[in-house]
Amino acid sequence: MLRRLDPFLMLDEFHVAISGGFPDHSHHGFETITYLLPHSPGIILLEYFCGHKGELAPGDLQWLCPGRGIVHAEMPASRDAPAIGLQLWLNLPARLKMTDPKYQEIPASGLPRAKDGNVEQPVEILKVLHKMSLADVSTNHIIVG
């Protein structure tokens, strides 16, 4: 039964508590797509052992392909505001599991928005990435919806 879900491994809504976060940890063999919800009161600080440091603000997206492996940390930037977002894990095909790690940060301002009358909202993130190639994705994934 689980084979039918491949490449989708996990979808998690997270609330990074003031005292929490995700200290140094590793990933390998699957991609992670992290989206900080636009209404998130906090931001996340990112640090990679390859030397990069960055942050995810509300509405920002990060696409991480750890390939053969990467160690990084994701921690709340403020003691006053938790960060709220979504993270999707996508399995890499066997031929890509040992590739070099890569990551991309796409700011909210770099994501297309749709406007209908007085209502403006972000375009569905996965459809945007799949159809418009805003991110250098390693694999094509079936988008449902």
Image (cartoon, rainbow, N blue to C red):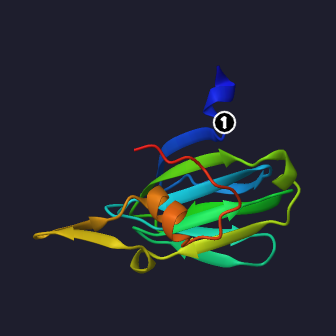
Q: Is residue 24 visible?
A: yes
> What crowding class fits label 1: few (fewer than 14 Cα within 10 Å), some (14-19), or many (20 or more)?
few
Q: Nearer the viewer, residue 64 or 99?
A: 99
55 left or right, relative to 23:
left
Q: Position of residue 19 (x, y in %)?
A: 53, 54
Q: Residue at x 41, y 65 (%)?
A: 42
Which of the 4 quarters of the picture holds residue 109?
A: bottom left
Q: Is residue 143 left or right of residue 119?
A: right
Question: What kind of element bears circle 1?
Answer: loop
The amino acid type, in three-letter code, at marker 1 is Asp
Q: Which residue is mark 1?
A: 6
Residue 36 appears in view: no
Nearest the eye: 21 or 27: 27
Give the image location of residue 75, x and y in percent. Answer: 58, 62
Camera-side residue: 32 or 51?
A: 32
Q: Quadrant of residue 140?
A: bottom right
Q: For the N terminus, which image quadrant?
A: top right
Task: Tell me where residue 76 appears, x and y as whole percent.
Answer: 52, 63
Horizontal and vertical percent position of residue 115? 21, 70
Quarter of the image with the C terminus is top left
Q: Looking at the rendering, which quadrant does residue 63 occupy?
A: bottom right
Seen in the picture, residue 97 relative to 133 is either above or below; the reply is above
Q: Is residue 22 above or below residue 53?
A: above
